[in-house]
Amino acid sequence: MEEAVGTIRAKIQAASVSELPALFLQYEQDMRAGVRAAVSQGQKRLAAYAKEVARSEALQKYEREYDAYAHICGIDEVGRGPLAGPVVAGAVILPKNCDILYINDSKKLSEKKREELYDVIMERAVAVGLGYSTPERIDEINILQATYEAMRQAIAELSVAPDLLLNDAVTIPGVAVRQVPIIKGDAKSISIGAASIVAKVTRDRLMVQYDRIYPEYGFAANKGYGSQAHIDALKAFGPCPIHRRSFITHFCGPEAQAPQQDAAYEA
Protein backbone atom coordinates (compact mmCIF):
# COMPACT_ATOMS: atom_id res chain seq x y z
CA MET A 1 0.00 0.00 0.00
CA GLU A 2 1.27 3.45 -0.94
CA GLU A 3 2.32 5.55 2.02
CA ALA A 4 -0.09 8.40 2.72
CA VAL A 5 1.02 11.94 1.86
CA GLY A 6 0.17 13.11 5.37
CA THR A 7 2.37 10.42 6.90
CA ILE A 8 5.29 11.39 4.68
CA ARG A 9 4.81 15.07 5.44
CA ALA A 10 4.78 14.40 9.20
CA LYS A 11 7.88 12.22 8.89
CA ILE A 12 9.83 14.94 7.08
CA GLN A 13 8.67 17.64 9.48
CA ALA A 14 9.70 15.58 12.51
CA ALA A 15 13.09 14.54 11.09
CA SER A 16 16.33 16.01 12.37
CA VAL A 17 18.54 17.75 9.82
CA SER A 18 20.87 14.75 9.83
CA GLU A 19 17.95 12.48 8.90
CA LEU A 20 16.62 14.63 6.05
CA PRO A 21 19.01 13.57 3.22
CA ALA A 22 17.99 9.91 3.58
CA LEU A 23 14.32 10.87 3.46
CA PHE A 24 14.89 12.94 0.32
CA LEU A 25 16.41 9.87 -1.34
CA GLN A 26 13.58 7.68 -0.15
CA TYR A 27 10.88 9.88 -1.67
CA GLU A 28 12.69 11.34 -4.70
CA GLN A 29 10.60 9.20 -7.10
CA ASP A 30 7.27 10.10 -5.49
CA MET A 31 5.73 12.72 -7.78
CA ARG A 32 2.60 13.45 -5.75
CA ALA A 33 2.24 17.20 -5.22
CA GLY A 34 1.93 16.91 -1.45
CA VAL A 35 5.09 14.83 -1.21
CA ARG A 36 7.03 17.18 -3.49
CA ALA A 37 5.92 20.14 -1.33
CA ALA A 38 7.00 18.36 1.86
CA VAL A 39 10.38 17.49 0.35
CA SER A 40 10.82 21.08 -0.83
CA GLN A 41 10.12 22.42 2.66
CA GLY A 42 12.60 19.93 4.08
CA GLN A 43 15.23 21.03 1.59
CA LYS A 44 14.70 24.65 2.56
CA ARG A 45 15.13 23.73 6.22
CA LEU A 46 18.34 21.86 5.45
CA ALA A 47 19.68 24.81 3.42
CA ALA A 48 18.86 27.23 6.24
CA TYR A 49 20.66 24.95 8.70
CA ALA A 50 23.74 24.77 6.47
CA LYS A 51 23.73 28.58 6.19
CA GLU A 52 23.58 28.92 9.98
CA VAL A 53 26.43 26.43 10.44
CA ALA A 54 28.56 28.50 8.05
CA ARG A 55 27.64 31.74 9.86
CA SER A 56 28.44 30.19 13.24
CA GLU A 57 31.82 28.97 11.99
CA ALA A 58 32.59 32.47 10.71
CA LEU A 59 31.77 33.81 14.20
CA GLN A 60 34.75 31.87 15.51
CA LYS A 61 37.28 33.81 13.44
CA TYR A 62 38.82 35.55 16.47
CA GLU A 63 38.65 32.44 18.63
CA ARG A 64 40.63 30.57 15.96
CA GLU A 65 43.07 33.46 15.51
CA TYR A 66 43.89 33.39 19.22
CA ASP A 67 43.60 29.63 19.64
CA ALA A 68 46.93 29.46 21.48
CA TYR A 69 45.17 30.97 24.49
CA ALA A 70 43.57 28.34 26.71
CA HIS A 71 40.63 30.34 28.06
CA ILE A 72 39.27 33.03 25.75
CA CYS A 73 36.59 35.15 27.37
CA GLY A 74 33.98 37.25 25.60
CA ILE A 75 32.88 40.45 27.36
CA ASP A 76 29.80 42.56 26.67
CA GLU A 77 27.38 44.81 28.52
CA VAL A 78 23.69 45.59 28.34
CA GLY A 79 21.89 48.64 29.64
CA ARG A 80 24.00 51.71 28.97
CA GLY A 81 21.12 53.60 27.40
CA PRO A 82 18.08 53.08 29.68
CA LEU A 83 16.69 55.69 32.01
CA ALA A 84 16.33 53.14 34.82
CA GLY A 85 17.89 49.98 36.15
CA PRO A 86 21.46 48.70 36.35
CA VAL A 87 24.02 48.18 33.64
CA VAL A 88 24.86 44.47 33.45
CA ALA A 89 28.05 42.96 32.06
CA GLY A 90 28.52 39.37 30.98
CA ALA A 91 31.77 37.41 30.73
CA VAL A 92 31.65 34.01 29.01
CA ILE A 93 34.35 31.43 28.33
CA LEU A 94 33.08 28.93 25.77
CA PRO A 95 34.68 25.56 25.07
CA LYS A 96 37.10 25.36 22.16
CA ASN A 97 35.44 24.90 18.76
CA CYS A 98 32.07 25.65 20.30
CA ASP A 99 29.22 24.42 18.09
CA ILE A 100 26.30 26.29 19.65
CA LEU A 101 24.25 27.64 16.74
CA TYR A 102 22.26 30.89 16.47
CA ILE A 103 24.45 32.94 18.83
CA ASN A 104 24.42 36.56 17.70
CA ASP A 105 24.22 40.12 18.96
CA SER A 106 21.41 39.79 21.52
CA LYS A 107 19.57 42.75 19.96
CA LYS A 108 19.19 40.75 16.73
CA LEU A 109 17.48 37.83 18.46
CA SER A 110 13.91 37.41 19.60
CA GLU A 111 13.22 37.19 23.33
CA LYS A 112 12.30 33.52 22.92
CA LYS A 113 15.54 32.71 21.10
CA ARG A 114 17.62 34.63 23.69
CA GLU A 115 16.01 32.65 26.49
CA GLU A 116 16.67 29.35 24.69
CA LEU A 117 20.30 30.26 24.02
CA TYR A 118 20.80 31.50 27.58
CA ASP A 119 19.98 28.03 28.90
CA VAL A 120 22.33 26.37 26.39
CA ILE A 121 25.17 28.80 27.11
CA MET A 122 24.81 28.42 30.88
CA GLU A 123 24.89 24.64 30.51
CA ARG A 124 27.79 24.36 28.10
CA ALA A 125 30.08 27.31 28.90
CA VAL A 126 33.36 26.66 30.67
CA ALA A 127 32.62 29.65 32.92
CA VAL A 128 30.16 32.55 33.14
CA GLY A 129 30.54 35.74 35.18
CA LEU A 130 28.11 38.62 35.70
CA GLY A 131 28.73 42.16 36.90
CA TYR A 132 26.30 44.89 37.90
CA SER A 133 26.47 48.62 38.39
CA THR A 134 23.53 50.23 40.15
CA PRO A 135 21.71 53.42 39.11
CA GLU A 136 23.28 55.17 42.09
CA ARG A 137 26.75 54.15 40.97
CA ILE A 138 26.01 55.24 37.41
CA ASP A 139 24.98 58.67 38.70
CA GLU A 140 28.07 58.87 40.89
CA ILE A 141 30.82 58.02 38.39
CA ASN A 142 29.04 58.21 34.97
CA ILE A 143 27.80 55.42 32.75
CA LEU A 144 31.09 54.63 31.03
CA GLN A 145 33.04 54.19 34.27
CA ALA A 146 30.15 52.23 35.78
CA THR A 147 30.20 49.94 32.74
CA TYR A 148 33.92 49.31 33.22
CA GLU A 149 33.27 48.45 36.88
CA ALA A 150 30.57 45.97 35.91
CA MET A 151 32.90 44.37 33.37
CA ARG A 152 35.70 44.01 35.91
CA GLN A 153 33.25 42.44 38.33
CA ALA A 154 32.04 39.99 35.67
CA ILE A 155 35.64 38.92 34.98
CA ALA A 156 36.29 38.49 38.71
CA GLU A 157 33.21 36.27 39.03
CA LEU A 158 34.49 33.72 36.51
CA SER A 159 35.29 30.34 38.05
CA VAL A 160 38.10 29.89 35.50
CA ALA A 161 40.66 32.66 34.99
CA PRO A 162 40.74 33.91 31.38
CA ASP A 163 44.03 34.50 29.60
CA LEU A 164 42.52 36.60 26.77
CA LEU A 165 39.55 38.96 26.66
CA LEU A 166 37.57 39.65 23.49
CA ASN A 167 35.66 42.85 24.24
CA ASP A 168 32.79 44.51 22.44
CA ALA A 169 34.49 47.74 21.28
CA VAL A 170 36.11 48.86 24.55
CA THR A 171 39.40 48.40 26.38
CA ILE A 172 38.68 47.97 30.09
CA PRO A 173 40.97 49.96 32.41
CA GLY A 174 42.53 48.20 35.38
CA VAL A 175 42.57 44.70 33.89
CA ALA A 176 45.87 42.83 33.61
CA VAL A 177 44.66 40.21 31.11
CA ARG A 178 45.38 40.88 27.42
CA GLN A 179 42.40 42.51 25.69
CA VAL A 180 41.28 42.58 22.07
CA PRO A 181 38.58 45.22 21.46
CA ILE A 182 36.37 44.38 18.47
CA ILE A 183 33.96 46.94 17.00
CA LYS A 184 30.46 45.39 16.89
CA GLY A 185 32.06 42.35 18.43
CA ASP A 186 28.75 40.88 19.61
CA ALA A 187 27.97 40.16 15.94
CA LYS A 188 31.52 39.09 15.02
CA SER A 189 32.67 36.84 17.88
CA ILE A 190 30.80 33.84 19.26
CA SER A 191 32.25 34.50 22.72
CA ILE A 192 31.15 38.15 22.80
CA GLY A 193 27.76 37.21 21.34
CA ALA A 194 27.29 34.67 24.12
CA ALA A 195 28.22 37.31 26.71
CA SER A 196 25.70 39.74 25.21
CA ILE A 197 22.93 37.12 25.44
CA VAL A 198 23.71 36.24 29.06
CA ALA A 199 23.84 39.92 30.04
CA LYS A 200 20.66 40.80 28.14
CA VAL A 201 18.57 37.95 29.55
CA THR A 202 19.84 38.64 33.07
CA ARG A 203 19.02 42.34 32.88
CA ASP A 204 15.62 41.80 31.24
CA ARG A 205 14.64 39.39 34.00
CA LEU A 206 15.69 41.95 36.61
CA MET A 207 13.55 44.63 34.97
CA VAL A 208 10.54 42.30 34.97
CA GLN A 209 11.03 41.89 38.72
CA TYR A 210 11.28 45.66 39.16
CA ASP A 211 8.03 46.01 37.23
CA ARG A 212 6.26 44.18 40.04
CA ILE A 213 7.62 46.68 42.56
CA TYR A 214 7.14 49.83 40.43
CA PRO A 215 4.30 48.95 38.02
CA GLU A 216 3.62 52.55 36.97
CA TYR A 217 6.57 52.69 34.57
CA GLY A 218 6.02 49.56 32.47
CA PHE A 219 9.50 48.17 33.11
CA ALA A 220 8.49 44.66 32.00
CA ALA A 221 7.79 46.03 28.52
CA ASN A 222 10.33 48.83 28.12
CA LYS A 223 13.15 47.36 30.28
CA GLY A 224 13.90 50.88 31.51
CA TYR A 225 14.45 52.41 28.07
CA GLY A 226 12.86 55.75 27.24
CA SER A 227 9.65 54.69 25.54
CA GLN A 228 6.95 57.33 25.31
CA ALA A 229 4.84 55.53 27.89
CA HIS A 230 7.81 55.42 30.26
CA ILE A 231 8.52 59.13 29.78
CA ASP A 232 4.85 59.97 30.33
CA ALA A 233 4.91 57.96 33.58
CA LEU A 234 8.05 59.80 34.70
CA LYS A 235 6.33 63.13 34.15
CA ALA A 236 3.22 61.96 35.95
CA PHE A 237 4.75 60.14 38.92
CA GLY A 238 8.34 61.39 39.09
CA PRO A 239 11.32 59.04 39.40
CA CYS A 240 11.38 55.82 41.41
CA PRO A 241 14.46 54.51 43.29
CA ILE A 242 15.89 52.68 40.26
CA HIS A 243 15.83 55.68 37.91
CA ARG A 244 19.17 57.17 36.90
CA ARG A 245 18.87 60.77 38.06
CA SER A 246 21.59 61.93 35.68
CA PHE A 247 19.60 60.57 32.72
CA ILE A 248 16.15 62.03 33.42
CA THR A 249 16.58 65.76 34.02
CA HIS A 250 14.98 66.49 30.62
CA PHE A 251 11.81 64.84 31.87
CA CYS A 252 11.81 65.61 35.60
CA GLY A 253 13.83 68.79 35.92
CA PRO A 254 16.98 69.58 37.93
CA GLU A 255 15.37 68.45 41.20
CA ALA A 256 15.78 64.84 40.00
CA GLN A 257 19.54 65.27 39.66
CA ALA A 258 21.69 63.12 41.92
CA PRO A 259 24.57 64.79 43.78
CA GLN A 260 28.14 64.41 42.50
CA GLN A 261 26.96 62.95 39.23
CA ASP A 262 28.65 63.21 35.88
CA ALA A 263 26.24 63.36 32.99
CA ALA A 264 28.90 62.24 30.50
CA TYR A 265 27.31 59.44 28.52
CA GLU A 266 28.29 57.42 25.51
CA ALA A 267 25.59 55.46 23.74
Image (cartoon, grey):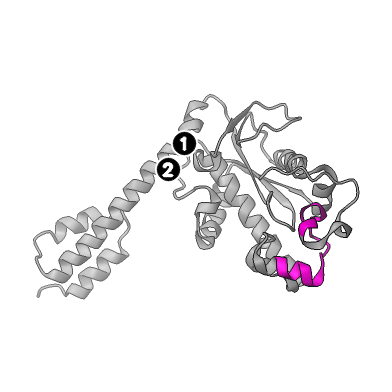
Asked if residue 59 shows in the view, the reply is yes
- The foreground one among 22 and 232 is 232
Label placed on residue 56: 2
Which residue corresponds to the image point at 54% horizontal and 44% vertical from the top-left?
Answer: 193
Question: Per the image, is 245 magenta?
Answer: yes
Which residue is tagged 1? 60
Q: Is residue 162 above or below residue 249?
A: above
Secondary structure beneath dot 2 equals helix
**Left or right placement of residue 156 versus residue 97 in this view:** right
C-alpha separation, residue under disc 2 versus residue under disc 1: 7 Å
- The residue most toward the right is 259
Q: Where does the image place residue 1, in percent across and percent down from the top left?
A: 9, 75
Q: Considering depth in this image, is 193 or 222 the residue closer to the camera?
A: 222
Question: Is disc 1 surrounded by few (<14), some (14 to 19) or many (20+) residues within 10 Å?
Answer: some
Residue 212: give x, y in percent of width and height: 74, 72
Q: Is residue 94 visible?
A: no
**Region in magenta:** 231-250
Residue 4's disc number: none
Looking at the picture, which amino acid does disc 1 mark? Gln
In terms of depth relative to the viewer, which is nearer, 131 or 251?
251
Residue 185, horizontal then vertical, whole percent: 54, 38
Q: Residue at x 82, y 49 (%)?
A: 139
Q: Main secondary structure of the magenta part?
A: helix
Q: In which quadrant will I find the C terminus? A: top right
Q: Are marks 2 and 1 in contact (CB under 8 Å)?
A: yes
- Judge whether residue 181 is colored magenta: no
Measuring 76% from the left and 30% from the top, which residue is drawn there?
A: 174
